[in-house]
Image (cartoon, rainbow, N blue to C red):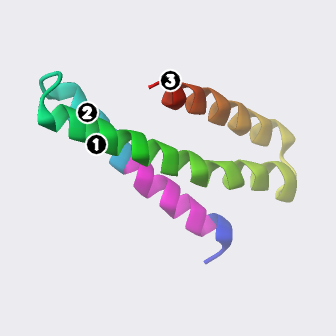
């Protein structure tokens, strides 16, 4: 497996965890222990997802020579990071 493939698998795994915990927190009663725990796991999984996304975006931009796609993914990374930071 290449480094990009390993990053993609990690990104998908953390993305799946983030999706599940987002909806778990969303469906749980606000302030309940389940809501709080799911929200904390969501936040950590989003940080891990963003950590995996940064080198992937840079590889697409610099290694694979796709400046438009790479720039878009870096922009998406910035706006996603902003929402995670503010949460």
Which segment is the magenta one? 5-16
Query: Nearer the viewer's eye, disc 1 or disc 3?
Result: 3
Residue 31 picture quarter: top left
Residue displayed at 23% across by 32% down: 25
Does label 1 or label 3 sit earlier along the sequence?
Answer: 1
Residue displayed at 76% across by 39% down: 69
What number is the disc on residue 86?
3
Q: Which residue is mark 1?
A: 20
Residue 84, percent from left and from top: 50, 31
Q: Quadrant of the N terminus?
A: bottom right
Q: Quadrant of the C terminus?
A: top left
Query: Nearer the viewer's eye, disc 2 or disc 3?
Result: 3
Residue 19, percent from left and from top: 34, 40
Density class for disc 2 (Cα within 10 Å; few <14, some 14-19, many ≥20) is some
Residue 41 picture quarter: top left
Element type at mark 1:
helix
Q: Nearer the viewer, residue 22 or 36?
A: 36
Q: Nearer the viewer, residue 64 or 21?
A: 21
Count of number-bearing discs: 3
Q: Give the Cα distance between marks 2 and 3.
A: 19 Å
Q: Which SS does the magenta portion mostly show? A: helix
From the viewer's perspective, is 66 left or right of 38?
Answer: right
Q: Are marks 1 and 2 in contact (CB under 8 Å)?
A: yes
Most extreme residue toward the bottom is 1
Residue 71, percent from left and from top: 79, 36
Residue 12, percent from left and from top: 46, 54
Q: Which residue is mark 2?
A: 23
Residue displayed at 71% across by 48% down: 57
């Amino acid at each position: 497996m290449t480094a990009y493939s390993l990053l993609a698998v990690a990104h998908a795994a953390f993305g799946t965890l983030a999706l599940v915990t987002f909806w778990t927190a969303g469906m749980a009663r606000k302030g309940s222990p389940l809501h709080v725990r799911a929200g904390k796991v969501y936040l950590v999984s989003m940080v891990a997802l963003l950590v995996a996304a940064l080198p992937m975006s840079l590889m697409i931009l610099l290694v694979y020579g796709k400046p438009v796609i790479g720039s878009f993914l870096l922009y998406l990374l910035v706006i996603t990071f902003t929402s995670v930071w503010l949460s």
